[in-house]
Image: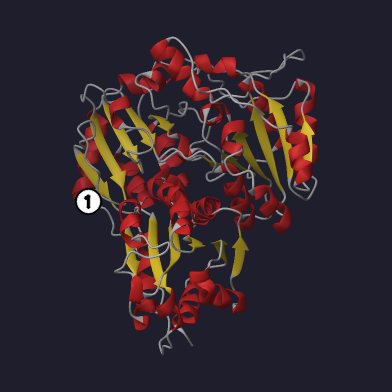
Amino acid sequence: MNAAQLLVRCLENEGVRYVFGIPGEETLDLNAALEDSDKIQFVLTRHEQAAAFMADVYGRLSSFPGVCLATLGPGATNLLTGVADAQLDRAPLVAITGQAGLERVHLESHQYIDVVQMFTPVTKWSTRVSVPESVPEVVRKAFRLARIEKPGATHIELPEDVAREEVRSAPLEVRRTSYPQAQREAVHRAAAIINAAKGPVVLAGNGVTRRNAVGNPTVDALRRFVQRSRIWATHTYMAKGVLDPLGQHSLPPVGLQRPGADLANVKLLAEADVVIAVGYDLVEWAPVLWNPKRDKIVVHIDSTAAELDGHYQPSIEVIGELDESLKALAELVSPRSERDSVIAAGQTRLGKDIPVPLPPFAVVADLRDALGPDDIVVSDVGAHKVWLARLFPTESPNTVVISNGLASMGIALPGAIAAKLVRPERKVVAFCGDGGFLMNVQELETAKRLGTAIVIVVLVDDRLGVIEVNEKRQFGRVFATEFGNPDFVQLAHAFGVAGYAVESAKDLLPTLRHALDLGGPAMIAVPWDHRANEHIADAMTYGRQPFVAR
């Protein structure tokens, strides 16, 4: 067999089920080997960026590296944004690119750029296969590095002449990586700090969600710790579902990248003297936003050592499997007495005469009502992401996919396709602004061709909402944010996809339910009231129960 065929055998050995991408002249041998595989399906996308986003979300939801493929030059550069998104969102991903033959990589040559060097800043490891016999070692290392904490992206380049060379070799054995138990002294020191605190608060991050994706009971351990200790707990946008939204000590989520915005909503965190950071990642929500005075004591609980920051310097680091560390701490931390601060209880009920365009709370409430507890929403990036993160309650981790590391527009549609491939038994919604949706609209054809039964909710307001709000706040005027839109129903029909336009508030919920039951892709255009975005950073009242239908 040749090196390309060996690489595909190594992918099969790693348990890869899908490779997302676009073939090129320099990947012909690799694509032929994929076509001959009876274990891997090559998913042809309409843009390499979408292929990387699919691999990104696939990795995040499955905890196994998603794989994307592109050719050299422009194919590789198109992958870059999605690969960088996986790197900062800590999603395991392996990118594979073709390359010109080794005989011309030292020359100025057609479509040749140094792809390995280009991917180096946005991956954990980027390398070229120069020797065919090294393929098993390269693939095993790429997958291992992509998956171990903190997960992220890796990159393999396979030149076309190397791909054709004959080779005698076999894949390496795949072995599970385990993490050591936290040191007893660190657990006791952390417990002492927490017990001495006047107002501790738990800040749970993305690490809790991804450690639970492979059956690790981290979420249960976190909830038991909060319940037993009676310590108030909040979570980042990317960690939605790790806390029970109806739990007695659950606080609103945090993640808005603006000084003071979330602290106004989560006052207990603003007032906290000790922050217990569990699986928290600095890229999710910068520590300067919740520890601006550098006066909070930080207890770092994670499977890896802390990334240091002037506003994040832990007094103690508890490093080990998260569930084991939380269980050990729960035995040592004394339950808190009930505090005077109480989050207001109550439900938000929707009235019958909600005007058009629809306010965010109404759209998010109907979306919640239309979906089951384990169904999946993949959010695009924009103002709607913040509203969804704040107002959409979920009791299950990995059911609300939010990019808040790189925060890339255009991720929702391709991400939803991947989510449906990972969880075909669940209903999946892509929640998009009109700006982000049109960045990868071409993947409607991919969804149609694959028959992935996803629903794309397009929130139509003809503008870049977050940018507009920031322009008003900083300059008192707006510029370069408004644009025109197509007729979204006709656009859907042009791709052979069912399309619906919501005309009034009472139409939204039944339209959502109808589209979710179609058994194929569908798109719903929803008029969105962008004026609400001016209050996106204001203190908000959070109900103790999810929104209910009128």
- Position in image of residue 61 (x %, y %): 53, 52
The quarter of the image holding the C terminus is: top right
Q: Position of residue 357 (x, y in %)?
A: 69, 18
Q: Is residue 213 left or right of residue 138?
A: right
Name the secondary structure under disc 1.
helix
Give the residue at x 61% y 44%.
413
Measured from the top left, where is residue 149 in percent x and y? 34, 55
Mark yes or no: residue 258 visible.
yes
The answer to which of 15 and 188 lies nearer the viewer is 15
Does residue 541 appear in the picture of this structure? no
* Number of numbered discs visible in the structure rendering: 1
Can you tell which quarter of the image residue 345 is in? top right
Percent position (x, y) of residue 138? 35, 72
Horizontally, residue 176 falls left or right of residue 17, namely left
Q: Decide: is 77 above or below 284.
A: below
Looking at the picture, tell me which residue is in the foreground, 322 or 253. Answer: 253
Q: Residue at x 63, y 57 (%)?
A: 421
Which residue reaches farthest top? 476
Q: Amino acid at mark 1?
A: Arg
Quadrant of res 145: bottom left
Q: How is the image coloured?
A: secondary structure
Q: Which residue is mark 1?
A: 184
> Horizontally, is 307 left or right of 285 in the view?
left
Q: For residue 96, what is the image quadrant? A: bottom left
Please tell me which residue lies in front, 437 or 101.
101
Vertically, is 428 above or below 365? below
Q: Residues within 10 Å of mark 1 (few under 14, many from 20)?
A: few
